[in-house]
Image (cartoon, rainbow, N blue to C red):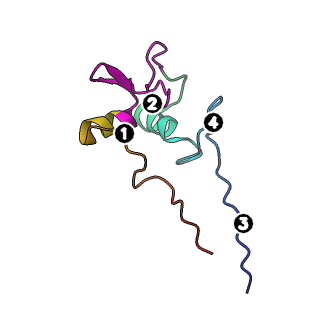
Amino acid sequence: MEENKSKETKLKCKFEDCDKNAFSRGYCQKHYDYLRNKGLIEKLPLNKDKKCCICGDNYKIKKYENNYYCNKHFLHMRRHGRILKRTKYDSNEIIIY
């Protein structure tokens, strides 16, 4: 028996110039949080000078041991003392046929 499994297409964030995958209501995690907290979405305040030294993101930048990290990598460093390759939130790499 053959099963037709179509590849799941991920929707992109509705906010202009954002290429991240949609999280909720058509927005990525960053824009959805901003919408939920502020009630509207405008251009988000970005730290143009500071970027995450791992992924290059410039939203919610925090300093840890003389390096700048995005929120995700900052929590990795604070909790584990290193950047993890995978977390429980990463998609599964195992393919079952």
Name the outermost residue toward the bottom.
1
Q: Which residues are magenta?
A: 45-73
Q: Which comes before the other along the chain, label 1 or label 4?
A: 4
Above or below — where is 40 with respect to 10? above
State how far apart marks 2 and 1 are (Cα): 9 Å
Secondary element at tag 4: loop
Viewer-nearest of labels 4 and 2?
A: 2
Q: Nearer the viewer, residue 81 or 70?
A: 81
Examine the residues drawn in magenta and state their main secondary structure: loop
Label 2 Cα neighbours within 10 Å, binned few <14 / some 14-19 / many ≥20: few
**Residue at 37% over, 22% down:** 68
Residue 51 lies, in percent from the top left, at 45, 21
CB atoms of marks 2 and 1 within 8 Å = yes
Q: Which residue is mark 2?
A: 54
Q: Which residue is mark 4?
A: 19
State how far apart marks 3 and 4 are (Cα): 22 Å
Quarter holding the C terminus is bottom right
Q: Amino acid at mark 2?
A: Ile
State how far apart marks 2 and 3 are (Cα): 33 Å
On whether residue 40 falls in the magenta region, the answer is: no
Q: Which comes before the other along the chain, label 2 or label 1?
A: 2
On whether residue 48 falls in the magenta region, the answer is: yes
Q: Which residue is mark 1?
A: 83
State how far apart marks 1 and 4 are (Cα): 24 Å
CB atoms of marks 2 and 3 within 8 Å = no
* Image mark for residue 6: 3
Label 1 Cα neighbours within 10 Å, binned few <14 / some 14-19 / many ≥20: some
